[in-house]
Amino acid sequence: MTRHEHEVERRTLFKVGLGTAVAAVVGTEFALPGAAQAAPSGEFPWIIDCDSWGARPPSSTIQITGNTTNKIILHHMAFPNVTDYSRDHALQLARDCQDLHMDHNGWADTGQHFTVSRGGYVLEGRHRSLETLDAGGHQVVAAHCPGENGNAIGIENEGTYITETPPDALLDSLVQLCTAVCRQFRLNAWDIFGHWDFRQTDCPGIAFYAQFPMIRTRVLHELGVPASAAPARRWPDIWRFVDSPVVQVGQYLLDAAGYTLTADGVFGYDMNAALADFQTTHGIPVTPDATFDTATWEALAPPLGKDATGLPVTALQFMLARKGYADVTASGTYDHATMKAVQSMQRLHGLHPDGKVDLSTWCAVVGGTVRESLCG
């Protein structure tokens, strides 16, 4: 683990309040069977392990988190959308990715836990990721998303998906992999998010992101879980070590609630006090890590309609523009273009397309999952 990776993971010592227990020890190399020389997985023989694709040894010890895994984060690799769907290409892809992450980024190993090629091959990314998937206990500390590296399984998908969508082979394998991760780490389909929900980035791409409701629904069916079991809303649990467009929405909404913040997407120290005061005044238990939990989001996000104006409308428009609605500008006035974009988002997520922004519409806009989107 590099100094940067260690610092990111060290900070998760302070993380609590995500709805799951967090262990007191983080970044410890637990003694798991076969850790030194992991054998190919008997549970998941369709995942190509590091030895099989010819991985270099990590430059430092690969560590296992003490945290509880609470989500999956999907990425696109921003690599070319190649038409070579062969196994040989997939193996070379894994080697190229590791070289990039170790030699250019200075990381200890491949950043993500798993990689899915455009041909549908699933490969282990960071060493020991397959071993810990088999065990289903604590995950490998990764380097795919600062602030979430000890809490989220990172999956990179070969290609660039801003205007194009992934091939069916990739999507089929991604669903299979997400289903396996959910089963092993006791997650659900509504725990799948995109990289830009927790980081300032264009990843996973506008076109790919629009397929997330479908991906989640397919995973839910594979898990055999009824949509009625899903929470009404699963919001992105941003917290004080996450910088992202979702954080910027939170800043706009806190500013509208009377807290003077700069809406830049950086979760600064000023947000800690503002959020704690907001939670206190609204009778919400204060989260010591400044996590935006469900109660916080639902007290913060106001209903919006055609006559709405102000910072909450600006927040809505900012996020809609990031999701690909190019006609929407952050004017602070709920105009016709904004209403049409809201209706489109509502249709995508299985909500009634009335153009009114209620809590479920807010949740879908900022990157969460609503129960209605899983009923397909």
Image (tube, rainbow, N blue to C red):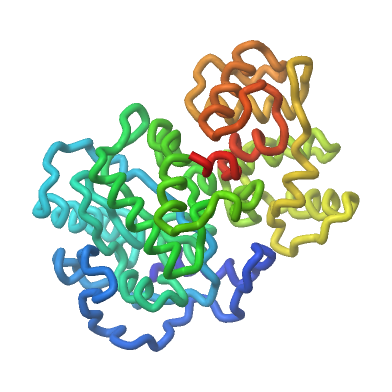
Looking at the image, residue 187 lies above or below residue 160: below
Looking at the image, residue 233 lies above or below residue 8: above
Q: Position of residue 50 (x, y in %)?
A: 21, 68
- Asked if residue 7 can be seen in this view, the reply is no
In the picture, measured across the screen, residue 197 lies left or right of residue 293, that is: left
In the picture, measured across the screen, residue 234 lies left or right of residue 136, that is: right
Tell me the residue at 56%/43% (across/down).
244
Q: Position of residue 109 (x, y in %)?
A: 30, 65
Image mark count: 0
In the picture, measured across the screen, residue 235 lies left or right of residue 191, that is: right
Toward the viewer: 346 or 105? 346
Where does the N terminus fall, quadrant-wise?
bottom left
Q: Position of residue 329 (x, y in %)?
A: 60, 18
Tell me the residue at 58%/40% (across/down).
372
In the picture, measured across the screen, residue 109 lies left or right of residue 345, that is: left
Tell me the residue at 15%/64% (across/down).
53
- The residue at the far top in this view is 336
- Asked if residue 303 can be seen in this view, the reply is yes
Q: Position of residue 71 (x, y in %)?
A: 51, 58
Tell me the residue at 71%/20% (across/down).
332
Looking at the image, residue 39 lies above or below residue 246: below
Toward the viewer: 55 or 297? 297
Toward the viewer: 113 or 108? 113
